Image: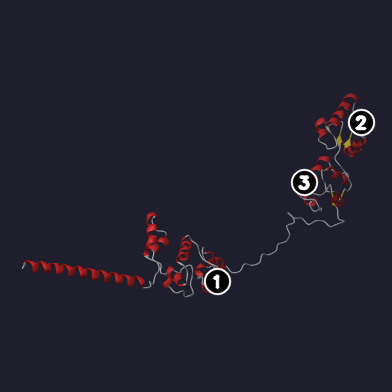
């Protein structure tokens, strides 16, 4: 009696163990069949969080492990799409790879906008072949078009008249400028004379007391000789220097009198009295004949 009850207990335990094994195999088979079934969406909720940049530092690697891409089971079917609004499912259906889709999401997350179809070619990792295949299907919504298109085409700029203040019209060959009466604006009309030369010509004429000959312009360093033909001196009337009244410092201000010549004039007046002519200085070593003739139009006694 004891042996039969012990046998029945052993027999029931074996039945339970066999039932558990069969149940485990059935569950494993169902899981295997479900795993082979194609999925409709290629991104889990964790992947969406990854695109949005909401995963933490520690959760990013974990999220990547949870991604289940079933790209092989999604057939590429080109259709019209807007890269500014298309979601991951639509982009995958176009035949894009998951990492390419991720780059599109990152571009849009940083504020990038596709304003024209050609902008889609900027996506990192997109090949020429893929872009050419998708180019006919890219449609950009009017909401993403440049706001400048609302204004319409720009009118061509009207060509204004030449700015004669900055770029004066040059005089023609054969014309001349009165050297003593011309201001800097008129001097700039001479070919080869710009603003800098015009200022130098006017300043030198003021120091001289007026020009008596056009050749005096060559006394300016590097003056363009070809510009001399455009100048003339009408009835010169230079300012006169009274050599019997001016001090040494005052005489030195004139370009034709240096320090030694001014001191020689002062010594002559102190030792011999007033000058009556420049010829009184001919025998002085500091006055050469050319110096006296050059200075003659500018002095009086």
| Position above or below: 298 against 184 | above
In this rendering, the label closer to the viewer, 1 or 2: 1
- Looking at the picture, how far across and down is residue 1, in whole percent? 5, 68
Visible in this render: residue 298?
yes
**Which residue position is annotated with label 2?**
281
- Looking at the picture, how far across and down is residue 81, in whole percent? 48, 72
| Position above or below: 40 against 192 | below
The mark found on residue 199 in the picture is 3
Q: Nearer the viewer, residue 17 or 71?
A: 17
* Residue at the farthest left position: 1
**From the image, which quarter does the C terminus lie in?**
top right
**Which residue position is annotated with label 1?**
132
- Looking at the picture, how far across and down is residue 59, in whole percent? 37, 57
Q: Answer left or right for 164 relative to 117.
A: right
Q: Nearer the viewer, residue 98 or 116?
A: 98
Visible in this render: residue 146?
no
The mark found on residue 17 in the picture is none
| Position above or below: 130 against 270 | below
Mark 3 or mark 1: which comes first in sequence?
1
Instruction: Using the numbered discs, state the Cα–Cα distance from disc 1 to disc 2 in whole angstroms.
Output: 96 Å
Instruction: Using the numbered discs, state the Cα–Cα distance from disc 3 to disc 1 in whole angstroms.
Output: 64 Å
Q: Nearer the viewer, residue 142 or 298?
A: 142
Instruction: Using the numbered discs, state the Cα–Cα distance from disc 3 to disc 2 in whole angstroms.
Output: 34 Å
Mark 3 or mark 2: which comes first in sequence?
3
SS assignment at label 1: helix
């Amino acid at each position: 009696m004891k042996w039969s009850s012990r046998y029945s207990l052993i027999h029931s335990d074996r039945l339970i163990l066999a039932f558990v094994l069969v149940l485990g195999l059935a569950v494993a088979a169902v899981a295997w069949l479900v795993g082979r079934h194609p999925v409709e969406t290629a991104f889990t909720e964790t992947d969406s969080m990854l695109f949005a940049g909401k995963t933490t530092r520690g959760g990013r690697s974990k999220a990547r492990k949870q991604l289940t891409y079933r790209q092989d089971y999604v057939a590429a079917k080109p259709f019209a799409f807007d890269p500014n609004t298309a979601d991951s499912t639509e982009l995958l259906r176009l035949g894009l790879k998951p990492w390419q889709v991720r780059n599109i999401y990152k571009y849009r997350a940083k504020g990038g906008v596709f304003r024209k179809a050609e902008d889609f070619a900027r996506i990192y990792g997109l090949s020429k072949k893929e872009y050419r295949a998708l180019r006919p299907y890219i449609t950009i919504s009017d909401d993403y078009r440049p706001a400048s298109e609302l204004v319409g085409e720009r009118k061509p700029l009207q060509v204004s008249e030449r700015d004669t203040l900055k770029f004066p019209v040059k005089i023609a060959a054969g014309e001349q400028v009165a050297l003593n009466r011309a201001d800097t604006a008129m001097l700039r009309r001479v070919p080869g004379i710009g603003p800098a030369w015009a200022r130098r010509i006017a300043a030198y004429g003021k120091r001289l007391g007026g020009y008596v000959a056009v050749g005096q312009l060559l006394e300016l360093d590097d003056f363009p000789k070809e510009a001399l033909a455009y100048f003339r001196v009408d009835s010169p009337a230079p300012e006169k220097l009274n050599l019997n009244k001016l001090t040494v410092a005052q005489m030195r201000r004139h370009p034709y009198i240096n320090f030694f010549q001014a001191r020689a004039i002062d010594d002559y007046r102190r030792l011999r009295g007033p000058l009556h002519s420049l010829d009184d200085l001919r025998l002085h070593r500091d006055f050469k004949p050319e110096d006296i003739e050059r200075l003659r139009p500018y002095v009086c006694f």
